[in-house]
Amino acid sequence: LATGVTLTGWVALIQGVTLLTATGAWECKAMKSFRCCSGVTLAFVTVALALVWLLGFWQIMTTNPSRCGLLIWEFGNLIWLFVPILTVLFVCCGLPCVYCHEYFHNKRIDASLMEHHANAKDSGSDE
């Protein structure tokens, strides 16, 4: 289990570096071949991370704290169960709530601005 925790950490670190590289390549309009290569590398590393996550998930579900130690077992629960559940909840619930809040807030501000503009136009002043 300790090897799985370490491997997950290293692969996640590599994924972060490749994500930064791919983002930089796309944002800075690097050569097309470099952008393509960085995107493919990111995809491979992400698949590797998913496989390592599945392996860790399987290990944590089939072991108990007495076999590997309470600290490592709890850390495995954190990275292979708790964090993925929170991520899914955030993507499915948190982001739509933030989007709706921003949408309705901006809609109210736009309506206020349009009303102010219409009033200014009716009074003949151009602000």
Image (tube, grey):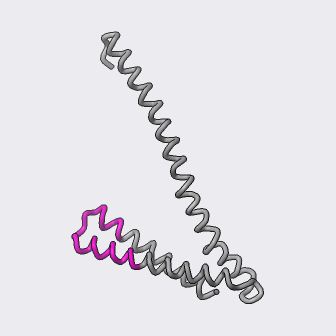
Q: Specify start and end residues of the magenta stretch as a single range.
A: 22-44
Q: Residue at x 40, y 20 (%)?
A: 116
* Rendering coords of residue 114 (x, y %): 38, 24
- Magenta stretch containing residue 18, yes or no? no
Task: Give the camera-side residue of 95 and 35.
Answer: 95
Q: Image height check: is 43 above or below 119?
A: below
* Rendering coords of residue 66 (x, y %): 77, 87
* Rendering coords of residue 82 (x, y %): 64, 68
> Disc count in the image?
0
Q: Residue at x 27, y 73 (%)?
A: 36
- Magenta stretch containing residue 26, yes or no? yes
* Rendering coords of residue 99 (x, y %): 49, 46
Q: Predominant secondary structure in magenta?
A: helix
Q: Residue at x 59, y 85 (%)?
A: 4
- Identify the image quadrant of residue 89: bottom right
Q: Residue at x 39, y 79 (%)?
A: 44
Q: Residue furthest right?
A: 66
Task: Give the camera-side residue of 85 and 23.
Answer: 85
Quadrant holding the C terminus? top left
Quadrant holding the N terminus? bottom right
Q: Image height check: is 19 above or below 57?
A: above
- Identify the image quadrant of residue 92: bottom right
Q: Image height check: is 82 above or below 117?
A: below
Is 82 on the left-hand or right-hand side of 69?
left
Q: Image height check: is 105 above or below 13?
A: above
